[in-house]
Image: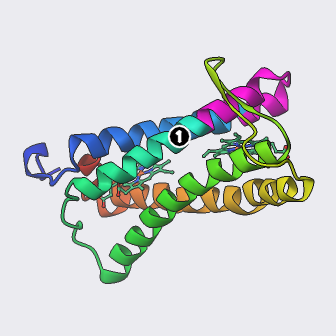
Amino acid sequence: MNHSNSTVQKWSVSSRIFHWISAVLLLITWGMILLNENIGGSSYMSLHKAFGISLLCWMIARVINRLFTKAPPAAPAPKWQTGMAHLTHFALYAILIAMPIAGLLMSVYGGRPVDIFGVFQIPVFVTPDRGMARFYNDLHTDIIWPMIIIFTLLHIGAALYHQFIKKDNLIARMK
Ligand code: HEM
Ligand code: HEM
């Protein structure tokens, strides 16, 4: 590798921390669904909701961080690839915020308060409504979840392309 770490244009420390902790929170939130589906009981779904709300708070802080810190200049690439990267990054931000909001609205419209790690509860702050609960359930599972899968795979696929085909050390910018 002819790029030494000191010449790589890195993302700010805060952006790097926000990035990797978001990825871990997403993985855990999804993992709770897998445990819930395969083992069952009431605790994994409750943890799914608590981690999902944690990710929402983390993403809100991340947006604020993104607005106030400078992004490094785009890595050299054809215009369409830079455009795709920006679109994918924007989409990831938007859907990682929309997803937990849809989950929260599904729960409260279903008349269920949301327990946050046994520390406090988000109360039912709307008038329960089966139709609305169903709408946000469909949004959560049938629309936004497939979008998360698609954009995350595109994103990780692009990272692997840079790592193994272009070999331009792009991942070092986020490490
Ligand atoms: C970014 C955060 C979140 C992600 C990635 C996520 C992802 C998922 C996934 C993959 C499923 C299973 C869908 C399926 O059956 O195919 C699911 C179901 C569910 N999620 Fe989330 N979720 C998030 C946040 C939340 C939050 C914050 C809540 C509630 C406060 C919530 C409540 C639920 C409920 C109640 C279900 C079960 C729906 C059903 O079985 O019909 N989720 N979620
Ligand atoms: C193996 C997993 C992952 C790898 C290797 C990876 C790698 C990277 C790299 C190298 C960048 C910087 C690109 C550049 O400098 O142009 C980046 C940015 C970004 N990544 Fe990831 N990523 C991963 C997982 C994720 C996940 C799971 C998400 C969210 C679902 C995500 C969301 C983002 C966002 C939104 C940006 C734009 C940076 C910003 O504006 O804050 N990444 N990623």
- Residue 95 position within the rendered picture, expressed as x and y whole percent measured from the top left: 57, 59
Q: In this view, does 132 lie to the left or right of 144?
A: right
Crowding near the residue tagged with mark 1, few <14, some 14–19, many ≥20 C-alpha atoms within 10 Å: many
In the rendered image, the vertical position of residue 89 relative to residue 40, given as above or below: below
Quarter where residue 98 is shown = bottom right
Ligand 1 within 8 A of label 1's CB? Answer: yes
Residue 159: in sight, yes or no? yes
Image point (71%, 34%), residue name: 123
Q: Would you name the residue on which mark 1 appears?
A: 55
The one nearer the camera, 48 or 102, is: 102
Image point (24%, 50%), residue name: 173
The one nearer the camera, 100 or 113, is: 113
- Residue 150 position within the rendered picture, expressed as x and y whole percent measured from the top left: 61, 62
Q: Is the magenta stretch mostly helix, strand or loop?
A: helix
Quarter holding ligand 1: top right
- Residue 72 position within the rendered picture, expressed as x and y whole percent measured from the top left: 19, 59
Residue 175: in sight, yes or no? no
Tag 1, which secondary structure? helix
Q: Is residue 74 left or right of residue 115?
A: left
Image point (83%, 33%), residue name: 37
Q: How many labels does the image show?
A: 1
The one nearer the camera, 104 or 93, is: 104
Residue placed furthest toward the top: 118
Circle 1: residue type: Leu
Image point (63%, 56%), residue name: 149
Residue placed furthest toward the bottom: 79
Q: Is residue 42 magenta?
A: yes
Q: Give the range drawn in magenta.
A: 33-52
